Image (cartoon, helix red, strand yellow):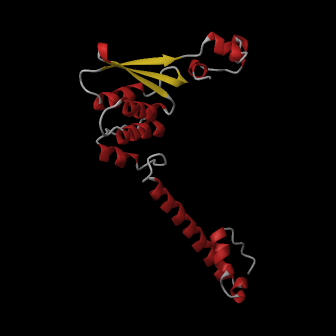
């Protein structure tokens, strides 16, 4: 009966620290396997709980972050968009400067953003440099920026798109794009 196989790595390690006479005992092997699996499961759960304390790893803990920061929870949004709202709220504290606005906008876009002031027209211009097209969560970006900006300023967003020159540089043709089944969204994000 000692042929019971222990698959759990933790169970195998636990059996190795016991005296050799236990290695052939069926009940010991079953016990090491079940306890090994349980300890591994506990380890996974502990790691998951610790992950919730880090915004970029959090999943089910995002609601706690949102509640703490006064953000309305929208569970229908993807995790990455919810994380970007949380990160921007965390970054968006302090005196409002172009650097702060840049950090907040980049937290949403996960790319490079250029922020310039147009004081004569009471505007701040946010230009998305490293991503093409309109960001999926533009409304969230705008809301976060308006929350921290002085009320007399407006925001102008400037978006970049794939140009014919960039298309030629990649040697793309309409046929090759069609063959690869690119959607417009995927096409706009090509660099």
Q: Give the residue furthest to the left.
A: 151
Q: In x, y percent, where is residue 60?
A: 43, 49
Is residue 23 rendered to the left or right of residue 127?
A: right
Residue found 72% across the figure and 75% down from its top: 4
Residue found 39% across the figure and 32% down from its top: 99
| Quadrant housing residue 186 | top right
Q: In x, y percent, where is residue 23?
A: 71, 83
Quarter of the figure with the N terminus? bottom right
How many numbered marks are there?
0
Q: Give the residue furthest to the right.
A: 3
Residue found 55% across the figure and 16% down from its top: 161
Is residue 42 rendered to the left or right of residue 8?
A: left
Residue found 73% across the figure and 84% down from its top: 24
Q: Is residue 1 above or below residue 56?
A: below
| Quadrant housing residue 120 | top left
Q: Give the residue furthest to the front.
A: 120
Quarter of the figure with the C terminus? top right
| Quadrant housing residue 177 | top right
Is residue 40 rendered to the left or right of residue 180?
A: left
Q: Nearer the viewer, residue 90 or 96?
A: 96
Q: Is residue 57 above or below residue 98?
A: below
Q: In x, y percent, where is residue 58?
A: 45, 48
Q: In x, y percent, where is residue 129?
A: 52, 23
């Amino acid at each position: 009966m000692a042929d019971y196989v222990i698959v759990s790595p933790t169970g195998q390690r636990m059996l190795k620290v016991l005296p050799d006479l236990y290695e052939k005992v069926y009940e010991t092997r079953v016990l090491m396997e079940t306890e090994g699996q349980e300890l591994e499961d506990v380890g996974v759960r502990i790691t998951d709980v610790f992950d919730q304390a880090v915004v970029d790893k959090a999943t089910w803990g995002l609601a706690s972050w949102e509640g703490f920061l006064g953000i309305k929870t929208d569970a229908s949004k993807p995790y990455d968009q919810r994380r970007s709202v949380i990160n921007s709220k965390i970054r968006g504290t302090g005196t409002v400067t172009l650097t702060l606005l840049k950090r907040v906008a980049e937290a949403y876009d996960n790319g490079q953003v250029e922020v310039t002031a147009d004081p004569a027209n009471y505007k701040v211009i946010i230009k998305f440099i490293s991503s093409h097209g309109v960001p999926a969560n533009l409304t969230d970006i705008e809301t976060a920026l308006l929350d921290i900006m002085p009320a007399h300023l407006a925001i102008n967003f400037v978006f970049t798109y794939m140009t014919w020159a960039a298309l030629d540089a990649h040697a793309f043709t309409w046929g090759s794009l069609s063959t690869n089944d690119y959607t417009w969204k995927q096409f706009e994000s090509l660099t």
